[in-house]
Image (cartoon, rainbow, N blue to C red):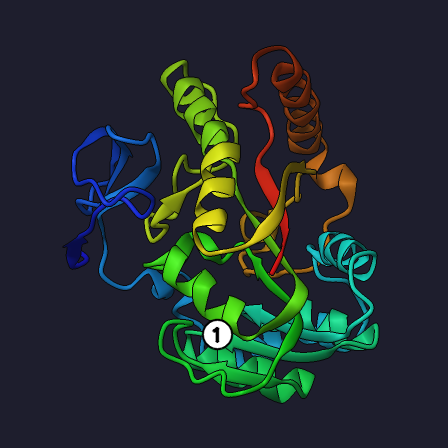
């Protein structure tokens, strides 16, 4: 059983909450009774352990086809979309990517002319990303690493902010490392989609993801709470939209290896159809009700 720590709401500081889900480990997802923010008041003591487990030489073997350019990473299209958005908002090309994991996003940015620095809490992944992509990776938590006097034109959190223990403090820290007018881009899961997943599960239907999991996640954002939290950190011109589904791989089930390359659509046709249909339905739902339970993810852009 993992060690559990307790915390208060990151938006209002209140400690009272209504339980939404409790994992077997004791990790509890709750909704703040004061402001409605969804977070984990009883959380995993080491949120950064979500990608723990692979030795660096194993990563070399598993990810070799992507590194060699034989196949593309399954998030390649999403990464291109992030960069298209950033390049339309800033002429600068100094990027800080927080939570780079294996480093494929900053590597893709580097190939498009960006000067990249990254932060990664897992030492093995930090070493792998630095060595294989020839980028500077600061090893450690965003709360602890020394960014130094450098300044950036863009800062990104791509599926990483939800694992940061104090997201407001983290955003304030990176804001200080950004030039005036620099762009923040952050992509996170949509908490309302997880509510739909729980309802579907009770009806015996699986959407393919663990609702509010992995249990290392400590924040669960809705469109409004995401914008509120980023505003608390001092950002402006905040815009939050729904991001198209990222079709994660099923290679582990098919071949028994955690491969990260794109899958031929024919091998994942049913789930792709379901995700895309829910995404379209969620957008229509938002126009009618102001809620979107169908889109998997939120994409936020803001200015320093």
The percent position of residue 53, horizontal first and vertical second, equals: 39, 70
How many discs mark residues in the rendered view?
1
Residue 179 shown left or right of residue 81 in the figure: left
Q: Quadrant of residue 26?
A: top left
Q: What residue lies at 37% left-to-right and 65% top-to-bottom?
A: 48
Q: Please tell me which residue lies in front, 31 or 252.
A: 31
The percent position of residue 55, horizontal first and vertical second, equals: 45, 79
Q: What residue lies at 63% left-to-right and 60% top-to-bottom?
A: 260
Residue denoted by label 1:
120
Q: Please tell me which residue lies in front, 138 or 241.
A: 241
Q: What residue lies at 48% left-to-right and 74% top-to-bottom?
A: 120
Q: Is residue 128 above or below residue 31?
A: below
Q: Please tell me which residue lies in front, 116 or 204.
A: 116
Q: What residue lies at 69% left-to-right and 33% top-to-bottom?
A: 272
Residue 272 shown left or right of residue 192 in the figure: right
Q: Is residue 271 above or below residue 123?
A: above
Residue 15 shown left or right of residue 230 in the figure: left
Quadrant where the N terminus is found in the figure: bottom left
Q: Residues within 10 Å of mark 1 (few under 14, many from 20)?
A: many
Q: Quadrant of residue 108?
A: bottom right
The percent position of residue 119, horizontal first and vertical second, equals: 51, 75
For residue 63, say whether it is visible: no
Residue 143 shown left or right of residue 290 in the figure: left
Q: Please tell me which residue lies in front, 70 or 200.
A: 200
Local secondary structure at mark 1: strand
């Amino acid at each position: 059983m993992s060690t559990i720590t307790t915390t208060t709401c990151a938006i209002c500081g209140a400690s009272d909450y209504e339980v939404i889900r409790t994992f077997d480990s004791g990790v509890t997802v709750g909704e703040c009774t004061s402001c409605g923010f969804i977070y984990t008041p009883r959380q995993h003591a080491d949120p950064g352990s979500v990608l723990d487990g692979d030795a660096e030489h194993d990563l070399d073997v598993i990810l070799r086809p992507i590194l060699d350019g034989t196949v593309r990473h399954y998030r390649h299209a999403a990464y291109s979309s992030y960069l298209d958005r950033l390049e339309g908002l800033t002429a600068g090309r100094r990027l800080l990517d927080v939570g780079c994991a294996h480093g494929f996003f900053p590597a893709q940015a580097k190939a498009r002319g960006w000067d990249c620095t990254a932060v990664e809490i897992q030492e093995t992944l930090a070493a792998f990303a630095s060595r294989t992509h020839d980028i500077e990776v600061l090893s450690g938590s965003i709360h602890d690493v020394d960014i130094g006097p450098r300044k950036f034109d863009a800062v990104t959190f791509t599926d990483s902010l939800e694992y940061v223990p104090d997201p407001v403090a983290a955003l304030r820290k990176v804001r200080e490392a950004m030039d005036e007018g620099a762009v923040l881009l952050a992509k996170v899961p949509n908490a309302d989609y997880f509510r739909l997943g729980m309802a579907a599960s009770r009806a015996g239907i699986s959407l393919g993801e663990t609702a509010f999991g992995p249990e290392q996640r400590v924040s669960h954002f809705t469109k409004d709470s995401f914008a509120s939290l980023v505003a608390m950190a001092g950002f402006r011109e905040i815009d939050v939209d729904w991001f198209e589904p990222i079709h994660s791989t099923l290679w582990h089930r098919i071949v028994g290896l955690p491969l990260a390359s794109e899958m031929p659509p024919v091998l994942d046709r049913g789930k792709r159809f379901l995700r895309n249909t829910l995404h379209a339905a969620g957008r229509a739902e938002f126009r009618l009700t102001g809620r979107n339970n169908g889109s998997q993810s939120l994409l936020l852009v803001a200015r320093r």
